[in-house]
Every structure is written in C-alpha cells, then in structure tokens.
Image (cartoon, helix red, strand yellow):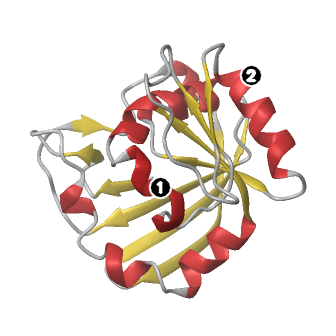
C-alpha cells in the first residue's frame, strides 16, 4: 500500500494518482521484480479491482498470478484472463478468500494489493504476517486514510525488518504480531 506522509491513500477527490507519479519508473526496479517473484497469488478488495479497467489486468498487470477479489457482488461480466492471471470473486468473506489465495500461491506469498477495508479486516483478525508500506513525499491534506483510530489495530505489534529507498518512495517492511 502506498501512503502519503500525512497518512492518506487517496486525495479528497478519491484519486490515488498523486501517490503514483513514479509508477512507470517503479515497474522495472529490483524492488518491484523481487515482490512480483515472491508473489504466488493476489488478494484485493472490490474497490481496488474496479479502479482499473478489469480487462486490462490480463497481460499488463505486474502480478500475472491468480487474483482473488473479496466482494459482495461479482461483476456482471467476468474480466479477461491470461495464462497465469485468473480471477476468483469471493463472496463469503476475507478468511475464505485468504484460504483460497494461500492454496493457489503454494509456497509463495499472498500479496494484498490495495483495499483499506480488506487490509483492516486482515490485520484485526490476525491474518497478516508482514506489512509493507510505501511512503511518498507528498502531503494530501485530506481524503481516505489508511488507518483510522482502532483499539484492535493498536493491539498489534510491528517490528521493522527492512527499509528501502526506491526513487521518490521509501518502502517500509514490518513483521506483525499480536
């Protein structure tokens, strides 16, 4: 998840674009190829899925792996898939989606892409081993926050394991404990 210095993942107009001015330069970096190589499946929320052209994921998305979308209602038209990238729309909760994603990932990681609500549910239920945050040197001053005050989140322990500077962004990795 990419966040502004003041804790927002979208600006007041609902756009995440100010957090990704470096997206084209980020894709060919060792940082990104390492994450792609470690990922065996992706878990994402419906809102994140809908932010892009659903048919554009096949072939163009960096994670060409099975994608599991947590949603109440699957889309009317199933998006285009490729050889490795498939979509499964999971309507029976985050635990079911994570279980299916883990099975598909095998011995590789399940990467959660976007999804404030999804991330919150996974964190508060103790289903996250590692938290990765990319901080962009921008102040948005309003919008959607990554974390709202929550006693369940405050009970989590974080241990910093890695800090990487990738162009403009600072990538932070933490192990998560209860």
The vertical placement of 135 against 169, above or below, is above
Q: Residue at x 72, y 29 (%)?
A: 126
Disc 2: which residue: 96
Residue 147 percent location from the top left of the image: 39, 35
The vertical placement of 79 against 133, above or below, is above
The residue closer to the viewer here, 69 or 145, is 69
Residue 23 percent location from the top left of the image: 34, 73
Q: Rounded to the nearest whole Å, what is the CA distance between mark 2 and mark 1? A: 23 Å
Q: In the image, 145: left or right of 31?
A: left
The residue closer to the viewer here, 131 or 22, is 22
The vertical placement of 46 against 152, above or below, is below
Note whether residue 81 is visible. yes
The number of callouts visible is 2
Rate crowding at label 2 as few (under 14), some (14 to 19) or many (20 or more) other CA atoms within 10 Å. Answer: some
The vertical placement of 78 against 63, above or below, is above
Question: Of callouts 2 and 1, which one flags the residue occurring earlier in the amino acid sequence?
Answer: 1
Q: In the image, 164: left or right of 17?
A: right
Q: In the image, 55: left or right of 91?
A: left
Q: Residue at x 18, y 47 (%)?
A: 15
Position of the C terminus by quadrant: top right
Disc 1: which residue: 57
Note whether residue 125 is visible. no
Q: Residue furthest right?
A: 107
Element class at badge 1: helix
Q: Do callouts 2 and 1 mark residues in contact (Cβ within 8 Å)?
A: no
Mark 2 or 1, which is nearer the eye? 1
Query: Quadrant of the rendered structure where residue 99 is?
Result: top right
Rate crowding at label 1 as few (under 14), some (14 to 19) or many (20 or more) other CA atoms within 10 Å. Answer: many
């Amino acid at each position: 998840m990419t966040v502004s210095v003041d804790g927002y993942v979208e600006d007041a107009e609902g756009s995440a674009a100010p957090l990704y001015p470096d997206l084209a330069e980020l894709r060919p970096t060792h940082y990104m190829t390492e994450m792609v190589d470690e990922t065996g499946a992706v878990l994402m929320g419906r809102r994140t899925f809908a932010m892009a052209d659903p048919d554009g994921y096949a072939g163009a998305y960096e994670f060409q792996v099975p994608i599991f979308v947590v949603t109440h209602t699957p889309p009317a038209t199933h998006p285009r898939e490729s050889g490795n990238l498939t979509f499964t729309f999971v309507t029976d909760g985050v635990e079911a989606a994570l279980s299916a994603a883990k099975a598909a990932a095998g011995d590789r990681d399940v990467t959660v892409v976007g999804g404030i609500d999804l991330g919150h549910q996974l964190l508060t239920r103790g289903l996250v081993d590692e938290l990765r945050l990319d901080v962009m040197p921008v102040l948005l001053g309003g919008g959607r926050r990554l974390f709202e005050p929550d006693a369940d989140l405050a009970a989590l322990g974080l241990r910093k394991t890695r800090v990487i500077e990738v162009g403009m962004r600072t990538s932070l990795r933490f192990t998560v404990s209860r």
